[in-house]
Amino acid sequence: MTTASQPKLDLSPAVIEAARTSKAWPFEEARKLLKRVTAAKIDRPVLFETGYGPSGLPHIGTFGEVARTTMVRTAFRVLSNDEIPTRLLCFSDDMDGMRKIPDNVPDRAFLEPHLHKPLTDVPNPFGGGASSFGAHNNAMLRRFLDTFGFDYEFASATDYYRSGRFDEILLKATEKYQDIMDVMLPTLGAERQATYSPFLPISPTSGRVLYVPMKAVDAKAGTITFDDENGEETTLPVTGGRVKLQWKPDFGARWAALDVDFEMFGKDHLTNASIYDRICEILGGTAPEHFVYELFLDEIGQKISKSKGNGLTIDEWLTYASPESLALYMFTKPKTAKKLYFDVIPKAVDEYFAFAGKLPAMPVEQQLANPVWHIHSGRPPQVDMPVSFTMLLNLVSASNAETKDVLWAFISRHVPGVTAATHPKLDELVGYAIRYFEDFVKPTKVFHAPDEVELAALTALDEKLAQLPADADGSAIQDAVLDVARAIERYQDHNKKSPDGGPGVSVVWFSALYKLLLGQERGPRFGSFVALYGIEETRALIARAIAGELAGAAAEN
């Protein structure tokens, strides 16, 4: 199923010329692929593939493969002047046996009788209209890919095996059985070698995927013989979905069967890449171009796992930020391991809008290195974001806003003419900020009770702010905040110089302000925050901190 048409590209001579030398990683990968396609004189659509194992709910890493592959596909289209047709196939390995029950299912006992059955034969424990566990997880992935507007075709291993689309390659595998075994056996321990087979029959009696040795492989008849779970010798044709391949041979066989030209996978597959390639070649195919990316880690540095349900889900990210911010996170440094948890969201949001704001003024060669160009397939939207996500979070914190109207009252006063109607993206961000603050910032707020030095500093800051006009801008307010700190030894940084030649201001000052007034370790430029929140409102916040009300209220909660 194709869910969207491919976006129209800017194929001006300047763009194509810049693409030929661009150091952005999608263009580097696309150049390798174009060289391969040209040399092979391929006269069919170039096939990009991504794989998905629906053993658990889809996580963001799965989305990342589709997003990143789409970026390479777009770069390839530019380099080829969009004269070579392309396809993107998102392939689900949903005929794999359910080898363990995921931690994040609602009823583990419900699934226990169905262990080792193909995922599309395991009942759906989640409710809804999906016919099986695998179908439910496939639907979740497709729903998000459709929401983001990817141009892709979805493929189910179950459908391909049972409809006969893999019959030819499976029969070829019986002919090349010993060649495949010669590749696989040296990679296995002695005990595993004794029982290994690239073929996994589906038991006619239990419906389970069986890991059993072959008693015979008959290439002429296209059958395998093995002992079923009940001990009865059984012969099955390898065709028609009665048999599937082990995952390593399956990887290479799929490449050969479908003529895959490009596939990326995580670093955990790197040691097996040569095995996939060799099996693909044994079965008459040409191994695709690869791109190996680093793995995503959870907050404590463990690999994200579908079965564990650690890390972020797609829906969780989209509750607090836009798909574009998620795509930016995928684009940046794909060969560097990155932690993927809630704290990374605000930075990703603000970086996206920063890149988007800079792009129009950039020369063409710099535009092609800008992540936003790749996120939007070369057609980035015009974006005006007058208030950052981080600033909105701090505004929510200071104002205790629970609705958009409260935040918009501050924003409209600070940025005249900006409304929810004129800036729908900002309005969207306001909603994200309220939800993110309530769920992740508010529960961790710890207000610091001011000591004597801090009490004096807050009093001086209040007096300084009182001297400013109500409409003072962020720069003027920031200068006033710095002036207060320069006179206090604790906040002086003698490695810096102030405009008058005295010591500069230490970051300790700003850290103290956020701990005292917002209950947080960090925040945006303080002068800009005060300009947005309001001088009088900030003075009221300072008064509550001096009186001990903020720290006292936090202690009571």
Image (tube, rainbow, N blue to C red):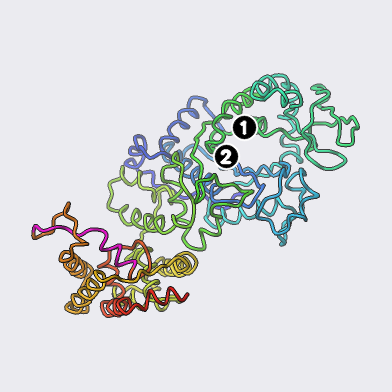
Query: Considering only vertical position in the picture, is 527 above or below 69?
Result: below
Residue 159 in sight here: no
Q: Residue at x 32, y 77 (%)?
A: 541
Name of the residue lying farthest toward the right: 232
Q: Which residue is mark 1?
A: 255
- SS of the residue under disc 1: helix
Residue 509's x, y, as percent?
25, 63
On screen, residue 493 versus residue 108, left or right, reads left
Q: Which residues are magenta?
A: 501-515
Residue 68's x, y, as percent?
48, 44
Q: Residue at x 54, y 47 (%)?
A: 61
Say which amino acid is labelled 2. Answer: Glu
217 falls in the magenta region: no
Say which amino acid is labelled 1. Answer: Trp
User: Which label belongs to residue 186?
Assistant: none
User: Which label belongs to residue 49?
Assistant: 2
Q: Crowdedness of circle 2 by 10 Å Cα count: few (<14), some, many (20+)?
A: many
Residue 101's x, y, as percent?
71, 49
- Between 81 and 541, the one lying in front of the other is 541
- Between 40 and 65, the one lying in front of the other is 65
Residue 314's x, y, as percent?
55, 55
Query: Is mark 1 in CB contact (under 8 Å) with mark 2?
Result: yes
- SS of the residue under disc 2: strand
On screen, residue 207 versus residue 409, left or right, reads right
Q: Crowdedness of circle 1 by 10 Å Cα count: few (<14), some, many (20+)?
A: many
Q: Residue at x 38, y 70 (%)?
A: 447
Query: Considering only vertical position in the picture, is 365 above or below 554?
Result: above
Query: Considering only vertical position in the picture, is 414 above or below 197?
Result: below
Residue 205 in sight here: yes
- Between 512 and 321, the one lying in front of the other is 512
From mark 1 to mark 2, how far is it between C-alphas? 9 Å
> In the figure, residue 449 lies in which quadrant?
bottom left
